[in-house]
Image (cartoon, coloured by chain):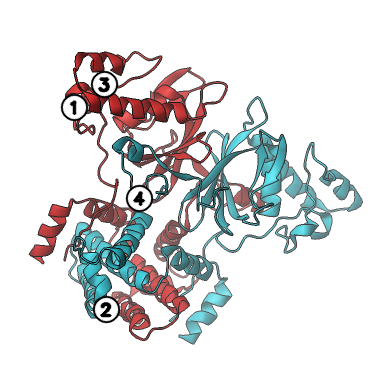
Chain colours: A cyan, B red
Amino acid sequence: MEVAGSFSRLSSPRPVSFSVTNCAKYPHPNPTKTNLSFRNSGYAPVSASVERSSGSNVAVHLDSKFETILDSVKWDSKGLAVAIAQNIDTGSILMQGFANRDALAKTISSRKATFYSRSRSSLWTKGETSMNFINVHDVFLDCDRDSIIYLGKPDGPTCHTGAETCYYTSVYDILEGSKEDKEERLAKTTLYSLEATISKRKEEIETLPNGKPSWTKKLLLNQELLCSKVREEAGELIQTLLDNEDKDRTASEMADLLYHSMVLLNLKDVSMEEVLEVLRKRFSQSGVEEKNSRKKN
Amino acid sequence: MEVAGSFSRLSSPRPVSFSVTNCAKYPHPNPTKTNLSFRNSGYAPVSASVERSSGSNVAVHLDSKFETILDSVKWDSKGLAVAIAQNIDTGSILMQGFANRDALAKTISSRKATFYSRSRSSLWTKGETSMNFINVHDVFLDCDRDSIIYLGKPDGPTCHTGAETCYYTSVYDILEGSKEDKEERLAKTTLYSLEATISKRKEEIETLPNGKPSWTKKLLLNQELLCSKVREEAGELIQTLLDNEDKDRTASEMADLLYHSMVLLNLKDVSMEEVLEVLRKRFSQSGVEEKNSRKKN
């Protein structure tokens, strides 16, 4: 069955427009029509648009908010703040750069992660050369207003080396002298480290058939066992609710279910990122769509 | 049942020591015994330790690697690089600060996220006042070597405001004039946004019993329905493997299973972070433990 709900601000990124012709509902479907107030940039100031639009209080109001946000950032002595691009589905930190006022304004309006290049002294939108844009779904400022998160979905690898993210050098790997994947182990959080471990076991089966045995390999080699385990773990998770077992038991059974399901995903060549993308899109459906979806079931 | 495997570098953080008495296996169980080469700091240089230890090639080798890492960072004109603290389980960006050479060295050795305060011109370890340390499991450098991730587990809220992270101000919320949770919506990735949405539905049941109906609320109010759905979704996920259905179908069924399981977690007051912590600890077991664990089953 299909499930649905409503996620706030987790839908596909919509470019923002403050042009007077589209001021009432600022997220604009056509990014090329963006008309923003970029101070010190080549863009026409919004005030001019506002002047042409008698009685367009909405535009004035939105512009005022927009300027307030840009003004609220504590730009450093060079007019910059740290900007971190993060994958909205996996949480991976993709890259870190710097934004000036124009870069932040352009990111908010175009929904494409844009930075200020300190070496070239110019704005650059990630992907303008590689076409691997980072499609921004949300922008967050920190408590001190001097650090920015661009929460978005990358079109492809972010690093200029072709790596998924720019962070693939572990200090502890170097210190431990680990030769294996020393320069290629991406910074991964728990779920994706587990996913990588499962993938590694699959590779070992193919490359080292007589290598160390493991439960994961056993599951990968025995579909019947794997399916019975997924079913069993779902049953045990349910039982913790029905039997009012303690929280630790529920967390443990959910961990089991997640792990075994992820082994199944590996066999189907499906990544957790793909699953999360489905969830994000599903939960960004409107209430009406949700209702219709439920009616179908 | 319990499952086990092996995660590389995802165990509990172990402080690093380069003292000659503990050079063979540098991760040291006692952080107070740390003896590192901190250039320009109050620490005794490692070279002194090495001199006292005839034939301690391991120590020399490790120190050399350590210095090489610190030297490899492209410190800016003020001797700083951006340092981002990220929750190893959820992927949340907790805070962003700056590190100088000493701060990075101290973080690597103590396994506590340490920064350089530009306003106070001194090192500070997050948690030294609040006791909410960030326990560092791994440290990553980016491709340009001027940006650092401290991948760790926080002891408590990271922000000085008491918020879980410092990023709780959404630019689009402000622009859209959303009053609801305007200043309190943390930057969350898909899984945790879904978790927050489920929690919100639970609250709505309690505070707005006649509010908008939703599938999530229906599940929260009907344990029998919820349990049958979790069981059903597990079965449908399995079926995609057995029937060799396409990848999209598997991703969709896994999304269903994950969502329904998370509704169950909500009823048991268990967070996904707790589940991921279980997975991380389980998969950091040694091979011996793994084998013993499997024997028990």
Return the residue at label 1.
B22
- Against A213, residue B107 (above or below) is above
Q: Which disc, if any, is residue A223?
A: 2
Distance from the alpha carbon under mark 2 to that under mark 1: 46 Å
Label 3 crowd (10 A; few <14 / some 14-19 / many >=20): many
* B261 or B279, nearer to the observer: B279
Return the residue at label 3.
B35
Q: Are marks 3 and 1 on the same chain?
A: yes
Distance from the alpha carbon under mark 3 to that under mark 1: 10 Å
Amino acid type at circle 4 is Asp
* B205 or B146, nearer to the observer: B146
Q: Position of residue A131 (x, y in %)?
A: 65, 57
Residue mark closest to the camera, 3 vs 4 = 3
Q: Is residue A147 left or right of residue A55?
A: left
Q: Give me the chain letter of mark 3.
A: B
Distance from the alpha carbon under mark 2 to that under mark 4: 29 Å
Return the residue at label 4.
B89
* A97 or A37, nearer to the observer: A97
